[in-house]
Image (tube, rainbow, N blue to C red):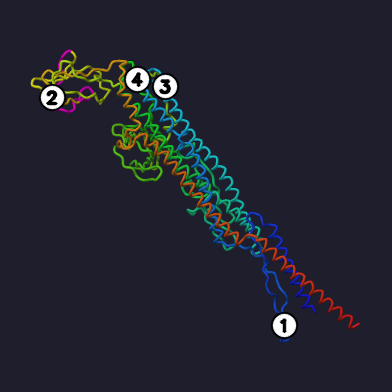
């Protein structure tokens, strides 16, 4: 009789615990991070009576948590990738709105500027057209500065989000370490809720930064960055932080710290929201800033260069419409020496849209690409007399460097922010060709002279009037002043050959007659000539960069295409990574999630078991009472 009661009581208790566990599953069906549980039930120890062996009921040996470590790890990685792709796509779309939109990007302002330049070429004596060109130039400069400011705002926003993310991650890392302590202390009796809570925190951290998870034999978990640097080891949590970039105080870099050391880990983070912020900043924001800066330099330099080769409305050689540029040189805050670096542009058409690292290794200076680290060949020794020459720049190093000292040279990164119109008077627009060439009326031969090509407007005699007179026989010529005083020659004449003097070049072709003369004179003020205005308008589509292969128009189109393509790729990547994460969530849910239909079936099953055990106790009681009554 006691065995029957014992068996019934253990069955009753098991059914009660199973019902309790099932009710907990149902209650937490919508709880984030909750893993379904079930009672682990085994047969009780066998007891003997002579040669017979009887069961002693059932035992509950634990509450099992449904958990698949492999699937959960895959989901954690997928959430890391999805979080990164989401933040990259978010910023890529905004960048495309700034630079890729036809109305808000730089393209619309460029078109308006050059359209007005064509109006000046159509009527070069119109003061209205000239003043309107200055207005369009100021509008263009302002748009460059606005776009540069918008890119700077994105940088500042990234800094703020890095700070916020670091605070959140550090709180979660500390909480994971504390949970490790609780789980280790509890040993095999650790509550399943502790594991669920810890996994939820791990997933939150993975949404911010890519990591590797390692389960330890004592029940704790170790978290490490993908490069092996630890985030959590047992009860110890390391700390993420931010600090000013050693070259640029306006930029924050990610750091990882223990109680004894700290290191910059920005380049080691490749996933999560933090990885997405850093990836966008380096791969797209910086690249777009440099591309925009190169366009700014191209527009201003090509205009200034061509305007200096023309004559303005007042009869003066043209000057600059836009202020010039100087490469940025940034000094590392960790430099120990007293060296300084100065950079100037020597040929803007050779300038590349990239940044340079200049490092002293203790013996020589080395140039490399600041982003990829690839070495860059230079000429020169870095002195004033023999500067380093690289990609259209001259770099001079002075002072005493220490081994390991570094500098950053940014030729175009901030150019858009500093585009400035310096021309105040529309009359200063040099629409006319500075020199006019032509035959004298008394010429007899059929030789013709070409328009003047400008070689060097800095020649002090550039605007002097010149006469080219053919000798007798007309196989040679001399260069005379207007008073027929000889200045150079005689020179052998070949039809179509260049004739260069005082910083200009012409060609005479055909058959001259002895005594034929050609004149080269300064174009008169207010002449209405539009030759240089036409050349100014052509600069937009004429090859300039990379040995004349790329025009400003092509660079502008490339920038629009680049940000659009990057945005499209980031959107596609976001869709793919989100789909992968969603599928893995379903897979994990199928293992760990609560199925209410299944739990409802379990309730009925455990209820029947409970009632059956209760009935067995009741039967045992009736039997016992019958025995008592029989022996009274």
Are circles 4 and 2 on residues that touch, CB within 8 Å?
Answer: no
Are circles 1 and 3 on residues that touch, CB within 8 Å?
Answer: no
In-image side of 257 versus 519 (left or right): right
Which quarter shows the C terminus?
A: bottom right
Circle nearer the N terminus (1, 2):
1
Residue position for label 1: 48
Within the magenta stretch, is there residue 72? no
Are circles 1 and 2 on residues that touch, CB within 8 Å?
Answer: no
Dot 1 crowding, Cα within 10 Å, few <14, some 14–19, many 20+ = few
Circle nearer the N terminus (4, 3):
4
- How much space separates mark 4 and mark 2, taking CA atoms? 35 Å
Are circles 1 and 4 on residues that touch, CB within 8 Å?
Answer: no
Camera-side residue of 82 and 273:
82
Q: Secondary structure at mark 2?
A: loop
Residue position for label 2: 511
Which quarter shows the N terminus?
A: bottom right
Label disc, if present, on residue 132 of the rendered structure: 3
Residue position for label 4: 124
Circle nearer the N terminus (1, 3):
1
């Amino acid at each position: 009789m006691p065995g029957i009661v014992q068996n019934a009581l253990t069955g009753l208790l098991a059914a009660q615990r199973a019902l309790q566990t099932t009710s907990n599953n149902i209650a937490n069906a919508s709880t984030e991070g909750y893993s379904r549980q079930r009672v682990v039930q085994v047969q009780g120890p066998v007891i003997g009576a002579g040669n017979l062996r009887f069961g002693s009921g059932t035992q509950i040996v634990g509450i099992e948590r449904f958990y698949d470590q492999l699937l959960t790890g895959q989901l954690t990685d997928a959430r890391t990738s999805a979080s990164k792709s989401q933040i990259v796509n978010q910023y890529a779309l905004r960048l495309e709105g700034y630079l890729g939109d036809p109305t808000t990007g730089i393209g619309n302002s460029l078109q308006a500027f050059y359209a007005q330049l064509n109006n000046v070429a159509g009527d070069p004596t119109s003061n209205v057209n000239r003043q309107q060109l200055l207005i369009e130039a100021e509008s263009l400069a302002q748009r460059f500065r606005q776009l540069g400011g918008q890119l700077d705002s994105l940088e500042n926003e990234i800094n703020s989000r890095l700070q916020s993310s670091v605070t959140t991650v550090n709180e979660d890392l500390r909480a994971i370490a504390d949970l490790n302590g609780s789980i280790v202390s509890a040993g095999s009796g650790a509550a399943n809720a502790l594991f669920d809570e810890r996994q939820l925190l791990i997933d939150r951290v993975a949404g911010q930064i890519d990591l590797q998870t390692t389960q330890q034999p004592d029940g704790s978990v170790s978290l490490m960055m993908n490069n092996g640097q630890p985030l959590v080891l047992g009860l110890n949590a390391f700390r993420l932080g931010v600090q000013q970039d050693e070259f640029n105080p306006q930029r924050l870099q990610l750091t990882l710290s223990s109680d004894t050391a700290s290191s910059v880990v920005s380049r080691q983070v490749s996933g999560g929201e933090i990885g997405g912020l850093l990836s966008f900043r380096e791969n797209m924001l910086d690249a777009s800033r440099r591309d925009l800066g190169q366009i700014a330099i191209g527009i201003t330099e090509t205009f200034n260069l061509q305007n200096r080769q023309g004559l303005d409305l007042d009869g003066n050689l043209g000057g600059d419409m836009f202020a010039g540029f100087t490469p940025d040189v940034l000094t590392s805050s960790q430099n120990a020496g007293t060296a300084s670096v100065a950079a100037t542009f020597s040929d803007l058409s050779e300038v590349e849209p990239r940044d340079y690292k200049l490092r002293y290794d203790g013996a020589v200076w080395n140039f490399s690409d600041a982003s990829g680290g690839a070495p860059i060949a230079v000429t020169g020794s870095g002195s004033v007399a023999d500067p380093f020459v690289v990609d259209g720049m001259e770099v001079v190093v002075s002072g005493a460097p220490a081994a390991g000292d570094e500098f950053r040279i940014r030729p175009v990164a901030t150019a858009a922010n500093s585009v400035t119109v310096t021309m105040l008077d529309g009359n200063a627009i040099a629409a006319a060709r500075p020199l006019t060439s032509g035959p004298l009326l008394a010429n007899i031969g059929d030789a013709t002279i070409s328009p003047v090509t400008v070689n060097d407007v800095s020649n002090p005699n550039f605007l002097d009037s010149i006469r080219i007179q053919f000798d007798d026989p007309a196989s040679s010529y001399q260069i005379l002043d207007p008073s027929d005083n000889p200045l150079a020659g005689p020179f052998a004449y070949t039809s179509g050959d260049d004739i260069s003097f005082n910083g200009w070049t012409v060609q005479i072709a055909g058959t001259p007659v002895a005594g034929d003369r050609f004149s080269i004179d300064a174009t008169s003020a207010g002449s209405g000539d539009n030759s240089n205005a036409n050349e100014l308008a052509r600069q937009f589509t004429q090859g300039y960069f990379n040995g004349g292969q790329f025009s400003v128009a092509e660079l502008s189109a490339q920038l629009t295409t680049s940000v659009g393509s990057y945005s499209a790729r980031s959107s596609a990547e976001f869709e793919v990574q989100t789909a992968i994460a969603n599928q893995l969530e379903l897979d994990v849910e199928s293992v760990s999630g609560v199925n209410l239909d299944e739990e409802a079936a379990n309730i009925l099953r455990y209820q029947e078991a409970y009632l059956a055990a209760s009935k067995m106790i009741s039967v045992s009681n009736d039997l016992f009472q019958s025995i008592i009554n029989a022996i009274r």
